[in-house]
Image (cartoon, helix red, strand yellow):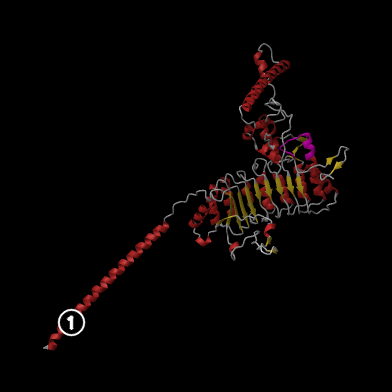
Amino acid sequence: MFAAGTGPSQGALIKSLSFVKKVKMGKRMEKALKEKAAASSTSQDAADDESKTPEPYSCTGMFEQDFTELCRRSGLQQGEIPPVVIRPKRPPTPPPPDPKAQTQVSAEDGEEEQKEPEEPKPTTYTTKDKFQYFKPTVQVEMENEDKPATVTEIYIRGWKVDDTMMGVLKQCLPTIEKLHTLYFWNTGLTEKTIAELASFLPQCSNLKNLTLDGNPVLEENFALLIGDDSLLANVSFRNNHITDKGAEMIGKALSTAKSCNKNLISLNLSYNKITDIGATHIANGLRMNRVVLSLSLASNQISDTGAKKLGEVLSRFPLTHEETVERRKLIREKGSPDRKSPSPPSRGRAESKDRPGSKGSGTVLDKTDKKRDKSSKKKQDAKKEKEEDKTVKGGAKKDDKWKKGVSKITMLAEMQGTKTAKGKKTVGGKDKKGALLPESETPDVVEAINPLMDSVENIDGQLWIPGNRALINLNLSRNQISEGGFKALLLGVQYQMTLNSLQPNPALKGLMRISLNKNAISPSNDAVSKLQELMTTRDPFYKPPSQSPDGDSQSHGGQ
């Protein structure tokens, strides 16, 4: 009975156990499916978040904050973002030691005891931990270190500025209002990064100084930085391996027959590979440019041919066919400054219908018209004098209008240390004290004239114009110039001095300083000595020796 009863109970037990296992397996499968679905949903949400573009960052003008945030958004890790630090400055000179602190008198025995002061820590340098000095940093100078929005100068040295970093600078630099200096030294710039830099530099309204030293680029597209829309005044391209290819582009950026850079004042092309061909291109760029004041071509490969071309530009040169055509266009549009407007003969004929207008009648009418014009001008000048005297009595400064209406060439004249001489023709006349009014001199003295509209001289069927007298500093040191090049430069300086005596111009004084050290010529050569004598007197800091009452020159040092 027992054996027969146990059979069915065991089968039921086995069935129940299998059922329980199936239920557990079903719950496990269901749980696994739920976890899988949840994981897939979270991964999908994460992918959706990554695919969403972040909100664009608007720069605030605070360089450190904007630079760090833009670097983080561009994908740089925290340790890869160069820190923005204050540019280190040389510590001041320590004060001299106090002599009273060196000795101390003992009160007990009355003997003077010598006490050695502790040696102070060095203040002429600062120390940093291990390789901290070589880590990439962005050095800045500020007007006020407590105000982060007053960054004026940015220095990047010794680390590569790639496309990502240039993109960051493109966004944050135009928002810095007081930025006026940007310095890149040995930063591995490329054709693309230089083009990117040139695209946003005009947006930096106060940026005037740019240095790109030690950045050789195979394409040599540095001329993009000094194009027609450039606002830069001082540019340095030293040690960039610039050849004649880059010099040609730079020369065209300085000026052509139809365009001219009107803001660049100083250009440094030292320590490059410019030969006579490149120097000729640079000289051609100075033909129509009357803004550049300083040019450095030191430590290049220029010989007599390039020096002769520069000397020709300084003295006088014939116009090319393209320049002659452009001159004719300007004359047709604006009128020649040499021509006098012809008297209209139709007025006399219209007034006298009975008889045809004759030459004599036309001249009489012209004379009467001129008299009327002169009388009206005198009345207008008298009114202007009265109004200006009233403004002076009322407390207004005379120089206010002059400062508002000053032009580019006036600034150049001030940089050269020149002043307007008395006795020139003016529109406003003189005030009660007899001094010339600066406002009246504005139209006659500081008017910007296109070199093509200057007075010309026809020699053998060619039109010759005076050369460049705006350039005041030229550096040709450490080249290969010999006697022929020195003579050409000497003739150029002599021509400028003669022209200044015949046609003085306060804004165009001519070359005042030229550096020709370490060239392929002996310092005792006649051309060298003559050029040095001429340039000594033309130096703006030159002081002639004082003379005694007997006429003998005395030294400034005295007895």
Give the SS element for disc 1. helix
Q: Position of residue 190 (x, y in %)?
A: 60, 56
When the figure is inspected, residue 498 is found, relative to residue 440, above or below; the finding is below
Left or right position of 519 against 57? right
Q: Which quadrant of the rendered structure holds the C terminus?
A: top right
Q: Residue furthest top?
A: 354
Residue 220 shows up from this direction? no
Instruction: Using the rendered view, name the quadrant where residue 311 is placed.
Output: top right
When the figure is inspected, residue 413 is found, relative to residue 365, above or below; the finding is below
Q: Position of residue 456 (x, y in %)?
A: 75, 35
| Within-10-Å neighbours for mark 1: few <14, some 14–19, many 20+ | few
Asked if the magenta segment contains residue 78, the reply would be: no
Residue bearing the label numbered 1? 11
122 vs 462, nearest the viewer: 122
When the figure is inspected, residue 103 is found, relative to residue 181, above or below; the finding is below
Q: Which quadrant of the rendered structure holds the N terminus?
A: bottom left
Residue kind at label 1, given as amino acid type: Gly
459 vs 215, nearest the viewer: 215
Instruction: Using the rendered view, name the quadrant where residue 545 is placed.
Output: top right
The structure residue drawn at horizontal position 80% and vertical position 37%, both measured from the top left corner, is 498
Residue 501 shows up from this direction? yes
Please provide the residue range marked out in magenta.
Answer: 496-509
Instruction: Using the rendered view, name the quadrant where residue 363 is placed.
Output: top right
Left or right position of 378 against 76? right
Q: Position of residue 227 (x, y in %)?
A: 62, 46
97 vs 58, nearest the viewer: 97
Asked if the magenta segment contains residue 499, the reply would be: yes
Q: Residue furthest left?
A: 1
Q: Position of residue 150 (x, y in %)?
A: 56, 48
